[in-house]
Image (spheres, rainbow, N blue to C red):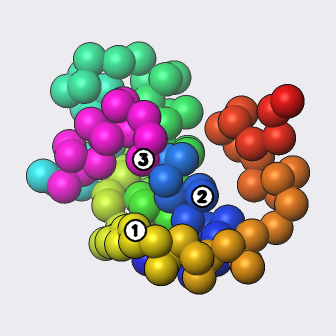
Amino acid sequence: MWTTGDDLLRQLGALGNPHRLRIVAALLAERTYVSKLARELRISRALLQVHLRKLEAAGLVTASSEVGEDGKTLRFYELTPFSVVLTPEAIAAAVPTLTTPESVRGDGEEGRT
């Protein structure tokens, strides 16, 4: 759940992409590591990591590193339980907590002219 208007923007921004929605759906089924998730979603690991960082910054997923049987370090991701309740009242409550557009940049949308 978001606590400020900036948090709300980060969560909505993170969820406003089809790749990230697919990642959330896949992680609901199981906690997994980057390479496996990239294969399942049929996207490159580099692109997947960009999207995972955005989801992690929004507090929607968490990551941990573990050493596999072969001695390689694997980066595992799992969903953080969340709920986004979006009503006019929730938006009105979030507005007073918004900071300047520069403080919430990250997806290239805020602050554009």
Q: Quadrant of residue 87?
A: bottom left
Q: Against 92, is 30 above or below?
A: above
How far apart are the alpha carbons under marks 3 and 1? 13 Å
Instruction: Let me know if residue 73 appears in the view.
Output: no
- Determine which of the numbered discs, if any, sits on residue 15 in the image: 3
- Residue bounds of the magenta highlight: 15-28
Q: Earlier in the sequence, mark 3 or mark 1?
A: 3
Residue neighbourhood size for the residue with mark 3, other residues' Cα within 10 Å, grouped as few (<14), some (14–19), many (≥20): many
Picture quadrant where residue 5 is located: bottom right
Quick check: can you spot residue 37? yes
**Mark identifier at residue 9:** 2
SS under mark 1: loop
Q: Residue at x 32, y 26 (%)?
A: 38
Query: Which of 72 and 49 lies nearest the eye of the viewer?
Result: 49
Residue, far left: 29
Q: Name the foreground residue: 99 vs 26.
A: 99
Query: Taken as a whole, is the magenta stretch helix, strand or loop?
Result: helix
What's under tag 3, amino acid-wise? Leu
Taking 30 as reference, is 42 left or right?
Answer: right
Q: Are marks 2 and 3 in contact (CB under 8 Å)?
A: no
Is 26 contained in the magenta span?
Answer: yes
SS at mark 3 in the image: helix
Q: Which amino acid, by three-letter code, is at mark 2? A: Leu
Say whether disc 1 or disc 2 marks the residue closer to the N-terminus.
Answer: 2
Residue at point 27% right, 36% down? Answer: 22
Above or below 10: residue 96: below
* Residue 75 numbered tag: none
| Residue marked by disc 1 | 86
Residue 24 lies left or right of residue 59; in this view the side is: left
Q: What type is the residue that disc 1 sits on?
A: Leu
Residue 42 in the image, given as x and y percentages of width and height? 26, 17
